[in-house]
Amino acid sequence: MAFQLDNISKPKTVTTKKSDTTSFLQKEITLFGNSFSNKIKEDLYSELSVLLKAGITLKDALELIESSHKKQQHKDVLKNISESIVSGQTLSQSVAEQKEFTDYEYYSLKIGEETGTLDQVVQQLSGFYARKNEQRRNIVSALTYPTIILSTAILVLVFMLTYVVPMFQDIFEQQKVELPAITKLIVAASEFIKSYGWLILVIVLLLFSSRAIFNKKLWFKKIKDEFAIKLPFIGDFVKTVYLSQFTQAVSLLTASKVPVVNSIQLVKQMIDFYPLKDALNKVEESILKGNTLSDSLKQHKLFDDKMVAMVKVAEETNQNEFIFERLNTQYNTQVQQRSKLLSTLMEPFIILFVGVLVGVILIAMYLPMFKLSSVMG
């Protein structure tokens, strides 16, 4: 019999005095490394699974894991969980009191406790975070080199506009040469950079530093996510990343015998991507009206025909866990392939873009020189 999430009431979160950190499920990158990050969670659940399967009590397992951590903040989180368990609470209730953890983890652990499969659930959570960490490493690896190239290129262009172009400009003013339109444009850009370059830098820094504030606004996330998904190639890559996370989460929840509607509700809480959350809201409404999951997914272009067909097979053969696991493997493979392809494609495009800009600047500077030499000749 499937385990009903409706029978679970989440305990009221207790506010404890600790630093203001945010779970990865709300914010991927945090400043100064003070968060209880995805990597920490992966190790926590992996070690907890091994210790529980070895027959060690939950309290002793948490104390062993706590002693292996070096950062006091991580020790404090695990110590608070241990103390809550000693006071008579379950692991899921103890986790719910720590804001470093999410509703998704709370319900998963609660299911494991109610079904007697806690060691399996924590192992699945470890695998879940391991996949997310793998995806993040692939994306960072794919974007690091192009980002370095682009940053270097921008510095080169700024240097040329700030120091090289003014040298030619002085020569042109001394010789009173009539400048072509393209040269006037480059000179104007150079003067703008010299006059307002610091202001542009301040604006960029302010926008970057205020991104955390804007990310809490629904309108900003909606515009940002919908813009990202419409970008050529990058949009497909972003969609594949989140479909991989979606199928992985559903696979884990299905293995724990969570009903479909409850799975959709939990996935909406853990994936912070507006197009997917909006589509899942409509999928949930469709399922509640009596439609199957495959028919509900089919109504939204975010879910491709392959997923719809595989889900339909899963419903007919009652192999939801296996099918979603296979889908997750396929999407994860696509993420790895496309991340490598993204890195391969971005590098020549950036080099070509920068080369064209540098060429335009050089041509704009040398055109008046050619005119001056012909007049002098």
Image: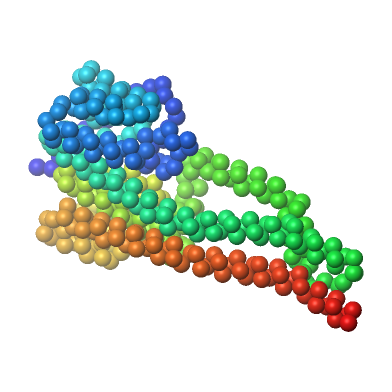
Q: Is residue 122 placed above or below 89 in the rendered structure? A: below
Q: Is residue 84 placed above or below 23 in the rendered structure? A: above
Q: Residue 297, percent across and down?
A: 28, 58
Residue 272 in sight in this render: yes
Q: Residue 295, percent across and down?
A: 24, 60
Residue at figure coordinates x 33%, y 34% from the top left: 101
Residue at figure coordinates x 70%, y 60% from the top left: 160
Q: How is the image coloured?
A: rainbow
Q: Left of 63 or right of it: where is 22? A: right
Q: Foreground: 28 or 372?
A: 372
Image quadrant in which you'd find residue 64: top left
Residue at figure coordinates x 47%, y 48% from the top left: 221
Q: Foreground: 273 or 28?
A: 28
Residue at figure coordinates x 30%, y 57% from the top left: 332
Q: Left of 108 or right of it: where is 374? A: right
Q: Foreground: 219 or 354?
A: 354
Image quadrant in which you'd find residue 22: top left
Q: Left of 178 or right of it: where is 72? A: left
For the image, the number of numbered tags is 0
Residue 109 in sight in this render: no
Quarter of the image for the C terminus: give it.
Answer: bottom right
Q: Residue 84, percent across and down?
A: 26, 21
Quarter of the image for the N terminus: give it.
Answer: top left
Q: Is residue 309 placed above or below 120 in the rendered structure? A: below
The residue lying furthest to the top in this view is 87
The residue lying furthest to the front in this view is 377
Q: Foreground: 159 or 98?
A: 159
Q: Residue 179, percent across and down?
A: 82, 71
Image quadrant in which you'd find residue 376: bottom right
